[in-house]
C-alpha cells in the first residue's frame, strides 16, 4: 500500500464538513434502532420509554449530537428479546442488561467499535453468535455468566478485543479448549478470566505463560494435564481450578508473590506440596482436599486457612513430620519421572512394603523395584543408589531419557538392571561382573548425545509461545488514543503534525513516524527528554522544559484541528507578526465575538447553520486541547469521543502486511517497539540516555488512527 503525505488542503476539510452533515441522519437511524429495541424488550409503561426522542428515556445516555452511548437497564425484570438493530448504535459504549429474563439469541454486536462494557449475565439468552466480538476493538469487560446458551466455544473474533480486561462466562455452556491466544501477547491487559462451570476440556495452554491475569476461575469441568504454566503467571491472586481432572505435581510457586487464594481440591495432583507454596507470605486460603498428593503433610503459616481433609491424599503420615527414609528415596525416584498418577494412587502412607505397586520387600527391606511398562517419562534417579537392599531394578519398556546414573554401580546386592526399550544414551557405567545389565532397545546407548530433542521441548497443546518476542500476530488497535491510554505501557508520540498523518490510497489516515515515540512514565508523571518535534506543534511546557507527558500530543492534535478549521498552517510567515503563530491567533479570534470567529474559518467552507455548529464544537475542542497548562487539556480519549460523535463509524483500514525490520502492521505498538529494540540491540528504552528510538524516517510504519476517524471515514462518504 502506497501512502501519500497529506498536507492540509481544502478538499480535505470539505470532506470533513460533508461528513458532519451526515450526523443528523445517523441520529435518526439511532432513534429507529432504539424503537426496535423497545419493541423487542417490551418494557412496562412505568419504565418511562415513551418520549419520541430516546435520548430522553430513563437509563439511556446520549452524546450532544443524540448518539446513544449507554443503555443501563440491568435488574429491571425485562422479559423480551434483544433486537438485532442494536448493531446500529455505533457510538454505544455500555450495554447493561444483566439480571433480567431476556430470552432468544444474543444478536451479533459485530462492529460496535466503541463498546467498552457488555453485561448480559443472568438472563435467558439461548445462543451467542461466533462473530459477536468482531471489530469490538474498545471492549474492556464482558460478562455473560448464567445463561442457558447452546454449547459455544470462545470465538476467534474475541482476538479483536485486545484491550480486554475482564472476561466472565461462568455457567455459560462453553465447550472446546481454552484458547492460547488469551496470553499476554494478544491480551496484555487481561486481568480477570472467569470460565467456571462449563464444559472446557484439554490442557492449560502454554500461551498463558507470562500473562498478568490476576483472577483465574476454571473450576468445575473436564480440564486435564499439568498446571506447570502457572509458574510463569506471576500476577495471579486468585486461582480456582478445583473439580477438574488436572494431574502431575504442583509447580514452583516462588514467582507468585501476590497469590492469595489457591483452590486445587478434587483433582488428581501428585507429588509433595512444594515448600515454595508454604512459604508464600501473600497466601490466605488453600484447598488441597481429594488429590493424590504425597510426602509430608504440608504446614502452612497460621494466617492461611487450609482445606485439607484427612486421608483424601497420599501423605506419608497423618500429621506434619518427616517420612520414612525408604519413602523419601522412593519419592525422589518418582520425582524424576514426574510423579505418575499410577504410582501416586498406590504409593500412600509411610511403609513401602505394604503392597505398593512395583515394590517387593524382604524383612521390611525393598529388594525389587519393577516399573516395567508404566508409561514413564523422565530420567532414572541417582537416588536408586541409596536403597542398598535393592537386588533387581526393572524399568524396561518406558520412555525414559538421559543416562544410567553411576550411583547404581554402588548397590552391593544388585543382580539385575533392566532398562531395555527406552531412549537412554551415554556410556553404560561399569557394574560388577555378576550384575546382568539389559540395555537393548535404546538406540542411542553408548553415544554422547540423544538423537531426541531434549525433554520438555514438546508442547502438549497449541497456543502461542512463552513471554518475550514471539511470532504471535496481534491485531492492531483502538492510533493516538491507543498510544496513551489503552496500551499497557503508555507512549508519547511527540511529533504529531499533519505530515505525520499518512493517507493510504483508501484515504484512511494513519499516524506515522514513530521515530520520537517514547515510553510514557507510569501514572501521571512526566519525563525529561531532549527536545524533539516540530515548531508550531510543540506544547509550551515541552519547548520550555523538555519534559513530556501524554498531553504534549494532545496539544499538537489541537493545533491540527485549528489548521483544519482555519485552513492556515501552524506557523504562517506570510501573516502579520501577531498572527504568525496559529494557536495564539486562533484563541484570540475564538474568544472574541461570533463575527470574528466566522472570519477565522476557512473561507472555502460553505457555512450553513448546522455546519457552523459542528465547527464550533471542533473549535472548542481545539482550544481545550491547546490549553496553556497540560492539566487543563483533555485526554485524547475525550477528544476522540467528541469528534466521533460528529462523524461516521470508524472502520479499521485493511491491514496489508508490510515488513519493516520484521514489523508488520498487524502488530500491536508494544510489540512493534519490542521488535525495534531487538533490531537495534537495545533492551532498555527507559535507560538509554538519548532516549530516542531510531527514527524510521520515511519508512511506512503506520497504524490505523482512531483520533483521525473523521479523515478515515472519508471512504464511506466517497462510497455514497
Ligand atoms: C424467564 O423466561 C423463561 C423463558 O422465557 C420462562 O420459562 C421463565 O419462567 C421466566 N422466569 C421468570 C422468573 O420470569
Ligand atoms: C473488571 O472487573 C473488576 C472487578 O470486578 C472491576 O473493578 C472493573 O471495573 C472491571 N473493568 C471494567 C472495564 O469494567
Ligand atoms: C449445552 O449445550 C448443549 C448443546 O447445545 C445442550 O444440549 C445442553 O442442554 C446445554 N447445557 C446447558 C446446561 O444449558
Ligand atoms: C478481527 O478479527 C478478524 C478475524 O477474526 C480479522 O480478520 C480482523 O482483521 C480483525 N480486526 C481487527 C480490527 O483486529
Ligand atoms: C516459563 O518461562 C520460562 C522463561 O520465559 C520458559 O523458559 C518456560 O518454558 C516457561 N514455562 C512454562 C511452563 O510456561
Ligand atoms: C477453600 O478453602 C477455603 C478455606 O478453608 C474455604 O473457605 C472455601 O470454601 C474452600 N473452597 C472450596 C471450593 O471448597
Ligand atoms: C512413549 O511416548 C509416546 C509419545 O507420548 C507414546 O506414544 C508411547 O506409547 C510411549 N511409549 C511407552 C513405552 O510408554
Ligand atoms: C534390612 O532390614 C533389617 C531389619 O529390618 C535391617 O537391620 C537391615 O539393615 C536392612 N538391610 C538393608 C540392606 O537395608
Image (tube, rainbow, N blue to C red):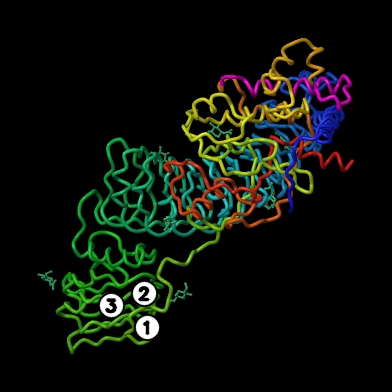
Reading the image, the residue beneath label 3 is 404
Q: Quadrant of residue 8?
A: top right
How many marks the image carries: the answer is 3
Q: In this view, does 627 lie above or below 451?
A: above
Q: Which mark is residue 444?
A: 1
Q: Is mark 2 on a helix, strand or loop?
A: loop
**Assess mark 1: CB under 8 A from ligand 7?**
no
Point out the tag, 3 or 1, that comes first from the N-terminus.
Answer: 3
The answer to whether residue 380 is above or below residue 676 is below
Q: Looking at the rendering, in which quadrant would you find the C terminus? A: top right
Residue 45 figure quarter: top right
Quadrant location of residue 451?
Answer: bottom left
| Residues shaded magenta | 601-629
Q: Which of 682 and 237 is in front in this view?
A: 682
Binning the other alpha carbons within 10 Å of mark 3 as few (below 14), some (14 to 19) or many (20 upward) gives many
* Residue 326 percent coordinates (x, y): 20, 65
Front-most of residues 251 and 3: 3
The residue drawn where x is 52% and y is 30% is 548
Pointers 1 and 2 in contact (CB under 8 A)? no
Q: In which quarter of the image is ligand 2?
A: top right
Report the residue that reaches farthest toward the bottom: 433
| Front residue of 491 and 307 | 491
Q: Tell me if residue 39 can be seen.
A: no
Disc 1 from disc 2: Cα separation: 10 Å
Q: At numbered mark 3, what does the secondary structure look like: helix, strand or loop?
A: loop
Amino acid at each position: 500500500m502506497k501512502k501519500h503525505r497529506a498536507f492540509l488542503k481544502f478538499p480535505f476539510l470539505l470532506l470533513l464538513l460533508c461528513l458532519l452533515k451526515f450526523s443528523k441522519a445517523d441520529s435518526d437511524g439511532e432513534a429507529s434502532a432504539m424503537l426496535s429495541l423497545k419493541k423487542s424488550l417490551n418494557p412496562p409503561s412505568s419504565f418511562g420509554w415513551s418520549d419520541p426522542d430516546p435520548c430522553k428515556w430513563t437509563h439511556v445516555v446520549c452524546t450532544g449530537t443524540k448518539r446513544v452511548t449507554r443503555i443501563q437497564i440491568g435488574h429491571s425484570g425485562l422479559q423480551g428479546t434483544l433486537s438485532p438493530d442494536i448493531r446500529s448504535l455505533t457510538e454505544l459504549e455500555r450495554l447493561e442488561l444483566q439480571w433480567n429474563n431476556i430470552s432468544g439469541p444474543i444478536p451479533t454486536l459485530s462492529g460496535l467499535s466503541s463498546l467498552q462494557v457488555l453485561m448480559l449475565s443472568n438472563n435467558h439468552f439461548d445462543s451467542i453468535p461466533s462473530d459477536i466480538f468482531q471489530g469490538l476493538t474498545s471492549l474492556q469487560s464482558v460478562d455473560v455468566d448464567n445463561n442457558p446458551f447452546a454449547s459455544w466455544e470462545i470465538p476467534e473474533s474475541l482476538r479483536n478485543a485486545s484491550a480486554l480486561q475482564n472476561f466472565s462466562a461462568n455457567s455459560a455452556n462453553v465447550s472446546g479448549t481454552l484458547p492460547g491466544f488469551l496470553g499476554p501477547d494478544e491480551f496484555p491487559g487481561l486481568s480477570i478470566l472467569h470460565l467456571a462451570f462449563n464444559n472446557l476440556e484439554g490442557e492449560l495452554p502454554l500461551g498463558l505463560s507470562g500473562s498478568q491475569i490476576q483472577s483465574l476461575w476454571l473450576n468445575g469441568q473436564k480440564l486435564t494435564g499439568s498446571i506447570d504454566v502457572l509458574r510463569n503467571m506471576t500476577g495471579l491472586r486468585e486461582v480456582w481450578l478445583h473439580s477438574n481432572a488436572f494431574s502431575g505435581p504442583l509447580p514452583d510457586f516462588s514467582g507468585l508473590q501476590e497469590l492469595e487464594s489457591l483452590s486445587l481440591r478434587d483433582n488428581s495432583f501428585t507429588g509433595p506440596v512444594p515448600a515454595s507454596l508454604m512459604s508464600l507470605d501473600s497466601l490466605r486460603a488453600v484447598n488441597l482436599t481429594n488429590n493424590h498428593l504425597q510426602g509430608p503433610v504440608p504446614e502452612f503459616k497460621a494466617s492461611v486457612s487450609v482445606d485439607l481433609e484427612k486421608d483424601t491424599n497420599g501423605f506419608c503420615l497423618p500429621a506434619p513430620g518427616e517420612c520414612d527414609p525408604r519413602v523419601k528415596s522412593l519419592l525422589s525416584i518418582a520425582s524424576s519421572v514426574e510423579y505418575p498418577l499410577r504410582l501416586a494412587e498406590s504409593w500412600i502412607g509411610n511403609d513401602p512394603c505394604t503392597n505398593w505397586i512395583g515394590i517387593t520387600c524382604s524383612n521390611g527391606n525393598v529388594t525389587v523395584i519393577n516399573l516395567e511398562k508404566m508409561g514413564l517419562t523422565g530420567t532414572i534417579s541417582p537416588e536408586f543408589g541409596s536403597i542398598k537392599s535393592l537386588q533387581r531394578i526393572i524399568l524396561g519398556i518406558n520412555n525414559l531419557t538421559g543416562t544410567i546414573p553411576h550411583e547404581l554401580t554402588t548397590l552391593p546386592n544388585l543382580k539385575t538392571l533392566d532398562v531395555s526399550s527406552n531412549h537412554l544414551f551415554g556410556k553404560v557405567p561399569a557394574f560388577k561382573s555378576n550384575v546382568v545389565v539389559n540395555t537393548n532397545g535404546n538406540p542411542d546407548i553408548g553415544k554422547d548425545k540423544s538423537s531426541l530433542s531434549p525433554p520438555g521441548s514438546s508442547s502438549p497443546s497449541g497456543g502461542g509461545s512463552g513471554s518475550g518476542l514471539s511470532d504471535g500476530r496481534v491485531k492492531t488497535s483502538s492510533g493516538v488514543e491507543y498510544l496513551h491510554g489503552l496500551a499497557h505501557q503508555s507512549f508519547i508520540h511527540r511529533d504529531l503534525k499533519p505530515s505525520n498523518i499518512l493517507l493510504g490510497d483508501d484515504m484512511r489516515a494513519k499516524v506515522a513516524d514513530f521515530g520520537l515515540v517514547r515510553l510514557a512514565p507510569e501514572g501521571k508523571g512526566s519525563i525529561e527528554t531532549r527536545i524533539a518535534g516540530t515548531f508550531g506543534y510543540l506544547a509550551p511546557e515541552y519547548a520550555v522544559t523538555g519534559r513530556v507527558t501524554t498531553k504534549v500530543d494532545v496539544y499538537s492534535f489541537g493545533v491540527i484541528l485549528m489548521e483544519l478549521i482555519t485552513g492556515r498552517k501552524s506557523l504562517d510567515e506570510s501573516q502579520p507578526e501577531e498572527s504568525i503563530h496559529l494557536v495564539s491567533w486562533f484563541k484570540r479570534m475564538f474568544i472574541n465575538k461570533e463575527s470574528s470567529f466566522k472570519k477565522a474559518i476557512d473561507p472555502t467552507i460553505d457555512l450553513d447553520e448546522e455546519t457552523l455548529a459542528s465547527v464550533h464544537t471542533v473549535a472548542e475542542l481545539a482550544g481545550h486541547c491547546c490549553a496553556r497548562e497540560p492539566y487543563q487539556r483533555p485526554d485524547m480519549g475525550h477528544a476522540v469521543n467528541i469528534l466521533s460523535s460528529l462523524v461516521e463509524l470508524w472502520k479499521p483500514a485493511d491491514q496489508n502486511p508490510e515488513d519493516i525490520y520484521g514489523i508488520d502492521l498487524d502488530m500491536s505498538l508494544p510489540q512493534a517497539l519490542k521488535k525495534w529494540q531487538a533490531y537495534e540491540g537495545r533492551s532498555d528504552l527507559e535507560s538509554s540516555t538519548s532516549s530516542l528510538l531510531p527514527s524510521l524516517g520515511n519508512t511506512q510504519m503506520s497504524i490505523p488512527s482512531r483520533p483521525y476517524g473523521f479523515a478515515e471515514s472519508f471512504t464511506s462518504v466517497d462510497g455514497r
